[in-house]
Amino acid sequence: MPEEVKKKRITDVGPHDYHDYLSPMIKKNYGKWAYHEILDPGTMVHVAENGDKLYTVRMGSPRLVSSGFVRDISDMADKYCGGYLRFTTRNNVEFLLENEKNIEPLKKDLEKLGYNVGGIGNVVANIVHTQGWVHCHTSASDASGVVKSVMDELYEYFVEDKLPSKVRIAFACCLNMCGSVASSDIAILGTHRKPPKINHERLVNLCEVPSTIAACPTNSIRPEMVGDKKSVRVNEETCVFCGSCYTVCPAMPIADAENDGLSIWVGGKVSNARTKPTFSKLVVPFIPNEPPRWDKAVQAVKTILEAYKKGAEPGERVIEWIERIGWSRFFKITGFEFTKYHVDDFRLAETSMNYSSHARF
Ligand code: SF4
Ligand code: SF4
């Protein structure tokens, strides 16, 4: 890099200090909030020790948004909130109002723009999700399309407080599980069903063979000479189609339009309230991709949600309900078939993870 460019380069400055973006009311009462109340599924109020009140209106967002969307919400923040707003950890938008009288006009304006207010309390809030076919090379399904289809069907659960407890739904388009599918009440996960196809011609030029071998959790990849080229072979008997090898080796693509799809998991949670955090568990091993509306996957999610709504005690999260009634009853109530795929057979985690990194080729 030329010296004069180097001199001008600004680096390692970190993010802006968030204090600069706090509304005056939050700055004044920082760390001095007494309590909060949910007024309805789209609105809550925080009351400070000195009696100050800050109203929050929460709005759903599709996460993947245009600059037009950002301008819309910025205009709303200018009009009603002194220019302040924030995003939640589930990618909802929150408008912070000091004047209670502005709540209804803001909601009306948001409605006119086509945005939905909700997501607070015992509801289905936004679906944490990933890149899908919009941007990632390892996806087995699409994120934005599935999420839109599910939220259209579950809209009433976003805008009305109807559930025994909050239900967190998450989506990931491959089992890298970017986001929170491993620990959500209901999780939708992109799933492959075929081994990678190996491009022997190009593999040695594109991939580092030892790290490709080491990427496999079931030790299914071995070095192999194909003609005069260094390459690898995959043991298709033990391959679990995780796609981890493709992540490190572009010559092992695994996407397959006919055989990729979704699996559904339930019962994860991260909070320590009442019971310990848990991982989500498999309930539907495979549903084919059905763009653009993914009807079967949407119905599977709805089946779980409605069985939970009907059977859970107030305050019970999905896993607490399932553990109370037992997994066999859960399968019976939901009608999902219990298959051999539900039986955990991954016994090699400790010995196989990176075990083959010792291989030399
Ligand atoms: S979950 Fe997988 S496919 Fe989806 S964004 Fe993450 S790495 Fe990409
Ligand atoms: S890394 Fe995954 S997809 Fe690749 S060979 Fe191993 S099990 Fe199969």
Image: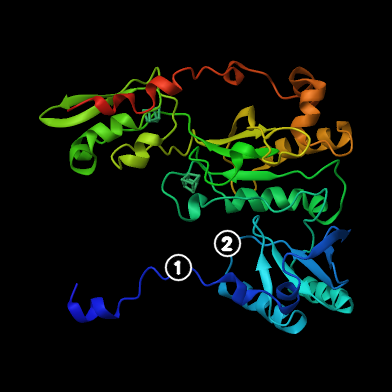
- Neighbourhood count class around disc 1 (C-alpha, 10 Å): few under 14, some 14–19, many 20 upward: few
Looking at the image, is 325 positioned above or below residue 75?
A: above
Q: Is mark 1 within 8 Å of ligand 1?
A: no
Which residue is at the front of the view, 256 or 306?
306
Disc 1 marks which amino acid? Gly
Can you say whether 83 is above or below 210 in the image? below
Residue furthest out toward the left = 228
340 horizontally vs 185: left or right: left
Give the residue at x 60% y 40%: 181
The part of the image, by quadrant, that contains residue 248 is: top left
Is 320 in front, or is 249?
320
Which residue position is annotated with label 1? Answer: 14
Q: Tell us which disc is closer to us: 2 or 1.
A: 1
Residue 112, percent from left and from top: 78, 74
Quarter of the figure with the C terminus: top left
Percent position of residue 240, x then y: 45, 25
Binning the other alpha carbons within 10 Å of mark 2 as few (below 14), some (14 to 19) or many (20 upward) gives few
* Separation of marks 2 and 1 at Cα, in angstroms: 24 Å
Q: For this rendering, which residue is in front, 170 or 293?
A: 170
Residue position marked by numbered label 2 in the rendering: 64
Q: How many marks?
A: 2
Which residue shows up at 81% across the image and 76% down it? 106
- The answer to which image quadrant residue 270 occupies is top right
Dot placed on the residue nearer the N-terminal end, 2 or 1: 1
* In the displayed structure image, the side of residue 69 where residue 333 appears, left or right: right
- Nearest the camera: 275 or 222? 275
